[in-house]
Amino acid sequence: MTKIFQHDIHHWSLEEFIRLIVIKTEIPIHDEQLRKHILHEIKKNRVTENFYQPPDEVDTCLAESAERIVGVLSNTIAHISSEMSLPIIFWMRIALILHNQYQINIDSVVEHYSKWRNDEGKNLQLIYSPKISKGKPENIPFDLFLVQTGYKRIPQILKTSEWHLEEIKGTVAKKTKKAKDTYCNIGKPALIKLKEMMKNAASNMQIKNLLPYHGHDKGKHLFYGKREDLYNILVEKYSLDITYKSYCQASSKLVNVTRKKCNLSSAQIQIIKLRKKPLTPLKAIHEI
């Protein structure tokens, strides 16, 4: 596909706009013919001698289409020239007028405008600052500028020097929050395996000082000691095969750790083993 755009990211040249318009114009002529004839019609109004000589028999459809497009351009923008470059929002407004008045296909313009509006143009605003007015410049919303072509504060013929784009002050790109990993970065199978490992060890008192616990953090167990100590026991006794860093991320969902001493008597151990449900919550030895 031939590259259409050659100017900066916020402007199109007249040549670029015409190329977009004629890409899908439904007339029985070649796009290049229409493009050249439009440029010829513009030049004809500016010079006494024609630089472009049209064929002897100009297709009526071509001539009418060119005249309509040039007519809208001349009635919308002051001092039109084939060398000009204007903000993309201006060209979108002209395209809408062409579509409304002459049903010209503007799908290509809309497609490229939408991409620009959602990317480079999303943090821009249109400022109207007429030279004859002493008031403050006005911020004109893009949608209002596009649809209200006859709006009293917006002249039908746009003096391009009175309009400019500027970045909206205070706009900061929002950082999307990273979704929390339900399986703590170790994966579902590994988390389920660790959960069952903890549950069996706590319920059957297989690891010293690891107790079943149902307090405010329902579903978590209680371990009296260091998190690292519990990890080492699980690796040695149960062949836990995840790294310590991954274990720390996952174990916070399964067990609470405290440094308080816990010396359970044999009677207390038997009570825990015989109960169908764990104590709710299980009190530390010094609280019993």
Image: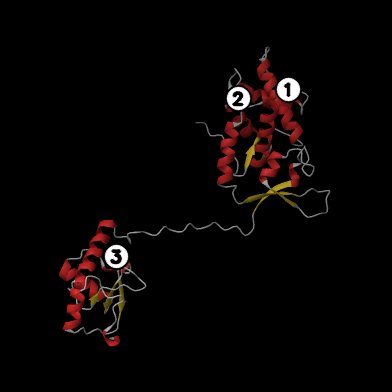
Say what secondary structure mark 1 lies in: loop
Q: CA distance from mark 3 to mark 1?
A: 77 Å
Q: Is residue 4 left or right of residue 266?
A: right
Q: Quadrant of residue 54?
A: top right
Across and down, in percent, residue 235 comes to 19, 69
Task: Please tell me how crowded label 1 is: few (under 14), some (14-19), or many (20+) other residues with Cα within 10 Å.
Answer: few
Residue furthest out toward the bottom: 286
Task: Name which residue lies at 64% across and 58% down.
Answer: 169
Which amino acid does the dot numbered 3 rest on? Ser
Q: CA distance from mark 2 to mark 1?
A: 25 Å
Q: Depth check: 201 or 163 in front?
A: 201
Q: Tell me the number on the disc at residue 11.
A: none
Task: Name which residue lies at 16% across and 83% down.
Answer: 266
Across and down, in percent, residue 221 comes to 28, 72
Which amino acid does the dot numbered 2 rest on? Thr
Q: Is residue 185 left or right of residue 150?
A: left
Q: Tell me the number on the disc at residue 50.
A: 1
Q: Nearer the viewer, mark 3 or mark 1?
A: 3
Which amino acid does the dot numbered 1 rest on? Asn
Q: Are marks 2 and 1 in contact (CB under 8 Å)?
A: no
Q: How is the image coloured?
A: secondary structure
Q: Quadrant of residue 286?
A: bottom left
Q: Tell me the number on the disc at residue 246.
A: 3
Say what secondary structure mark 2 lies in: loop
Q: Nearer the viewer, mark 2 or mark 3?
A: 3
The residue tagged 2 is 25
- In the picture shown, does residue 10 fall above or below 272? above
